[in-house]
Structure formats: C-alpha cells, structure tokens
Image: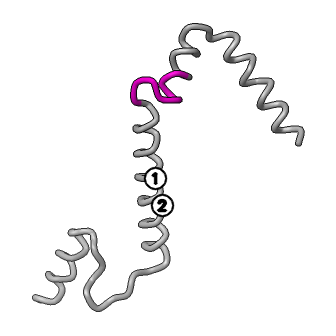
Amino acid sequence: MGELLDALNAADAGGAAPDEPKSTVNQAAEAFQSASRRVGEAVDAARQPDMPLDVLARLVRQAPLPSLAIAFVLGVIVARR
C-alpha cells in the first residue's frame, strides 16, 4: 500500500514513478512545454517598449486597413511559392 501511495504522490508532483521510465508521450509533452515556455519568453521580451512587436502593434493600431492589405499581399506571395 505504501508503494502505491508513493507512486501516486510522485505522479501528482509531476514526475513519473521512481521505477518506471518516462514514456515517449511524456517526453514529447515535456519538450513541447519547454519549447512553448521559451517562445512565450521570447514574445514577452519582444513586446517590451520600443521592441519590434511593440512597434508593429502600434503601427497596426494606427492604420489597420493598410496593415491588413500588406498582410494579405504577403500571404499571397508566400502561398504561391
């Protein structure tokens, strides 16, 4: 009974049971979470004042229709390649 409780506590803590190797699905999920966290941190850094995403967001707010037209033309160019 104690071993089962230890395994359940380890699973609740986010880790696998001590005797079991991590499955491929768990490894893929951890890799995805790690990549997602790094991308999120990069986006947060780029949204700081006077950084590229902040400048782009301000331009889109000031001129939404021209920004939409530019995005559409760029999408057509990329899709045709």
Image quarter of residue 73: top right
Q: Is residue 78 magenta?
A: no
Q: Amino acid at mark 1?
A: Ser
The percent coordinates of residue 34 (x first, y second) are 42, 60
User: In front: 36, or 6?
Assistant: 36
> Which segment did they paint magenta?
48-55
Contact, CB < 8 Å: mark 2 with mark 1? yes
Q: Is residue 37 above or below residue 12?
A: above
Give the residue displayed 52% in from the left and 21% down from the top: 55
Q: Tag 1, which secondary structure?
A: helix
The percent coordinates of residue 59 (x first, y second) are 57, 15
Residue at image mark 2: 32
Q: Amino acid at mark 2?
A: Phe
- The N terminus lies in which quarter of the figure? bottom left
Query: Left or right: where does residue 18 sit relative to residue 57?
Result: left
The percent coordinates of residue 10 (x first, y second) are 21, 76
Query: Left or right: where does residue 76 sit relative to residue 1?
Result: right
